[in-house]
Amino acid sequence: MSILPSAPRFAHHDVPLGIGEASPPVSWTTSAPDGWTQAAYEIEVRRVSGTTTTGRVPSDQQILVDWPADPLVSRERADARVRLWGSDGSASAWGAWGSVEAGLLDAGDWHAEAVGAPWVENEDKDLRRPPLLRRAFSTGDLERARLHVTAHGVYEIEINGARVGDDVLNPGWTVYSERLRVHTYDVTDLLAAGENVIGAWLGDGWYRGRLGFTHHGHTFDMYGDDLSLIAQLELTHADGTTTTIATDASWRASPAPILSSGLYDGETYDAREEQDGWSSPGFDDAGWEPVAVRPARPERFVSPEGPPVRCTEQIAPARVLTSPSGARILDFGQNFTGRVQITVSGAAGETVTLRTAEVLQEGEIYTRPLRAAKSTDRYTLRGGGAETWEPRFTMHGFRYVEVSGWPGSIDDAVANGDIVGRVHHSDMRRTGWFESSDPSLNTLHENVVWGTRSNFVDIPTDCPQRDERLGWTGDIQVFAPTASFLFDSAGFIENWLADVAIEQLDDGTVPWFVPTIPGGPTWNPIRTGAVWGDVAVLTPLTMHERFGDAHVLEAQFDSATAWVERMIREAGPERLWRTGHQLGDWLDPAAPPEDPADARTDRFLVAQAYFAYSTARMAQFARAVGRTLEAERYARIAGQARDAFRSEYVLPDRRLTSDAQAAYALAIRFDLLSAGERIAAGDRLAELVREAGNRIATGFAGTPVISDALTDTGHLDEAYALLLETECPSWLYTVRMGGTTIWERWDSMLPDGTVNPGDMTSFNHYALGSVADWMHRVIGGLAPAGPGYQRVLWAPQPGGGLDHAEVRFDSPYGEIRGSWRREAGGIRYVLETPTGVDALVRLPGADEQTLAPGSVLERFVPTP
Ligand code: BGC
């Protein structure tokens, strides 16, 4: 077998077009004979100005290595390829070329203004009708065309009647005042010599639509009250000259068939208002008005780091139900984030109404958990044949849809495929899989995947269905390790972390949700709280650990230290943190529905545990970016905080002051105890689990650590018992109750099938799904032991009566696959690693061994 590097990948881009990095780091995977290791690489870069090469660079690195040439300039395209040398003296041929193209990197590249409707809008902000915008222009022969586009609001573009791309809800949600994302499209094929038309749909989205939670009031016009398009279409002609068509006063506007549209509330569309051919040549726009023009402020424009939101799957209804009240309800059989697409025929003026819900109660759609989100789409037919429609600028989290006003038979429509669910989320590459011999465990894992898909919708949200959908910092802090195994989430999360740094207060306090919006007295002014605030330190470290991205540590260093310094000041010279707004072990199942922070574990114990842990991790963070002095200081303070934890919360008999699962789990997992205390804590934790009948007693803080805490202290059986329990509360209780996602509360649905009376009851929250990370690392056995999985620890710990388990991970280096299976007289283990990844292998009952990069280990370990 010969040695061959792949075409290079640039930064975290799946499609490196219009990127914002002038010097994008380069990665490749390598196919090579077993055991082959890289000793050197060479990267050649070809661009209009010429070809350059790094020459032979002695290095074993292949992930995110520095851009090997002069920085790209705006619009510049470059090709790059790689060749390699092995430690054994071997040499590869050149790999395939990969191409990258920069977007507009400087504010000075922009001529576009922000253009929108010139008319006075409805005073009721819920009922503002968005405009359509258009501009006709002529061109000669074209070599290439690029569209750079963003908006105040959300947009969809059409050129000559065809939709540009398939991205949804662009530009997504960032702190628009500081960072507004511009997407770049290659639209060469949509244009032709002669007359052309570019047109845009707009919607309120996050920019000016309704945001916020029921009890704290809603916010409109968070970033402004205009709805505007900012676009620059750059045409390069055959003779090398260029023409730019930018949004300016020459564009025209007319009311859209969308009568109103909101992320929470749904969309109302009247097809009788459609204007045929509006985005095509030959349309008479004399009735359209000149647009209103505002400044575009390009100094805040950035390019996307991660993928856009797209429809990634279509699902047909599994059942069509008739409710006791006579309503017709479609059950998609899966809770997901997305929308419904209908194809309908009927008379002009008939209106189909679609209302979504996550659950049924007494046979009817149950919408109380949606709180003030109306989640209702309305389509009024234009008549005259089949009409296909899907709302453009809303999103719902649902499994059921109540359909009313359908002309004709709904059953026939479903049978004909005329009503489908369209799953939407940030279109990240799936990278991780887990399977075992236990079907309910596999369902649980599948539910975690659906929880990720449902809540990675441009920002990491808490939930997709109710009037919230905010980037809650604590939720992603605990879930990022799981998400990073399941999906290539690096670009997605790193983009959001940049906003965390922006929204962080001057005193280092990290907001509860990013981007921040007014949240009423509970959340504003923003007070300091552990677990949530720790995202600033722990999540960049997760990105480094899982994706080998050191750049994110540099980028987030100031944000991370600001958070740790904030805790240090709050804790004072005693290094004991007893202040702040602490949510503690949020949603402990014993907390009353109306007070989810009233947990069994002292909320200040949780804060102290996080203070000590994050400060210790901050020392590693500082060391990784070469800040030795800071590293030493944080290590010292972390030690003091640990001592303070012990004197405040560990009793002389080695019990903790909160004799609760979360307390022991945090103390063990965050390494806050002496050796003797740790053993005692592990024993007590295991005892508490047994006493609880293996039912979970932890919330957002304890759940992500309890399984590891048991495992690390030698209580593997209890860890499995907890995972495999099916009574309420437990993970598999949710599976037994028919859950298809991870719930916000252990008992979002009560054992009698009714919905938890709490005001916060989502069926699609990912935090409690963080146990999947343990399933990958302990059942499947695969854990990163070096940044980006350059080195892995493979240490499966079979148990729980399972006969078989398998993990598969498409790491930055290529696929890693590990499995074990019980056979007569023992267990057979198999591990496969790609070139570049070596493994430390620890199998129960066998000596530790290492596995060379790019090889296969098969080992049968007999039962003693
Ligand atoms: C959200 C969360 C969040 C919590 C914090 C809830 O409303 O849905 O998941 O972390 O508030 O209080």
Image: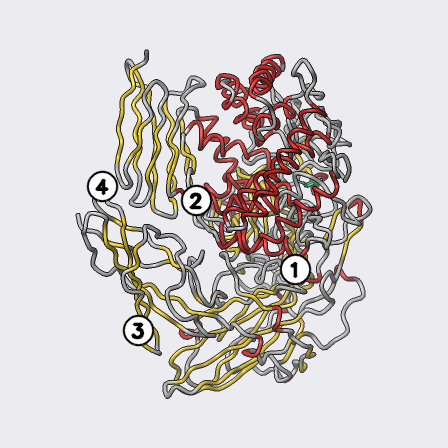
| Residue that numbered label 4 is attached to | 34
Q: Nearer the viewer, residue 621 or 329?
A: 621
Label 2 sits on a secondary structure element that is helix
Q: CA distance from mark 1 to mark 2?
A: 30 Å
Q: Would you say the beta carbon of the disc 3 residue lies within 8 angstroms of ligand 1?
A: no
State the mark number for residue 175. 1
State the mark number for residue 51. 3
Q: Decide which of tag 3 and tag 2 comes sooner along the chain.
A: 3
Residue shown at 62%/81% (left/top)?
248
Residue shown at 67%/67% (left/top)?
130
Q: Decide which of tag 4 and tag 2 comes sooner along the chain.
A: 4
Specify the amino acid type for callout 1. Answer: Val
| CB contact under 8 Å: marks 1 and 4 | no
Label 1 sits on a secondary structure element that is loop
Which mark is in front, 1 or 3?
3
Q: Is residue 425 visible?
A: no
| Residue that numbered label 2 is attached to | 787
Specify the amino acid type for callout 2. Answer: Pro
